Image: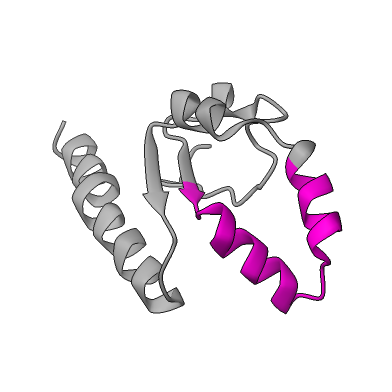
Amino acid sequence: MSGHDVVVIDAALMLDWRLDRQVDITIVVHASRARRFALAEKRGITPDDARARQRRQLPYSEYRRRADVVILNNGSKNDLRRKLDSFWRKVILKEIRRKADT
């Protein structure tokens, strides 16, 4: 993608569709089962439906295996934002600067 230093793809099914093979870095944002079910309930999803959805997903071990980075999301939105901002500064911006210097 000429003209762009970074393209961010927010796609929950990226690994399921094997699109991780098409990108430089794959980040998995993961929450504990209890957290995922609590968030689903807030969205009006029943526990039975949440379990059915989870059964259709890849196992977490597969996400861990294929991800370059796993960020845990068991806290608040602000906690997640801080983790993502830190990752952005430490990894992405550092890489952009490195490429700009070459």
Q: Is residue 26 above or below residue 90?
A: above
In the rendered structure, which segment of residues is drawn in magenta?
29-54
Q: Where is residue 44 in the image (x, y as percent from the top left)?
A: 82, 75
Instruction: Say left or right for 62 vs 98.
Output: right
Q: In which quarter of the image is the C terminus?
A: top left
Which residue is at 29% across, 47% downward? 92
Instruction: Say left or right for 37 vs 7.
Output: right
Which residue is at 24% across, 45% downward? 91
Count all numbered tags in the image, as a single digit. 0
Q: Position of residue 36 (x, y in %)?
A: 61, 60
Residue toward you, 101 or 64: 64
Which residue is at 73% across, 44% downward? 54
Q: Is residue 5 above or below residue 20?
A: below
Q: Where is residue 17 in the image (x, y as percent from the top left)?
A: 72, 29
Residue toward you, 14 or 36: 36
Which corner quadrant of the image does residue 59 belong to?
Answer: top right
Residue toward you, 92 or 33: 33
Which residue is at 66% across, 62% downward? 37
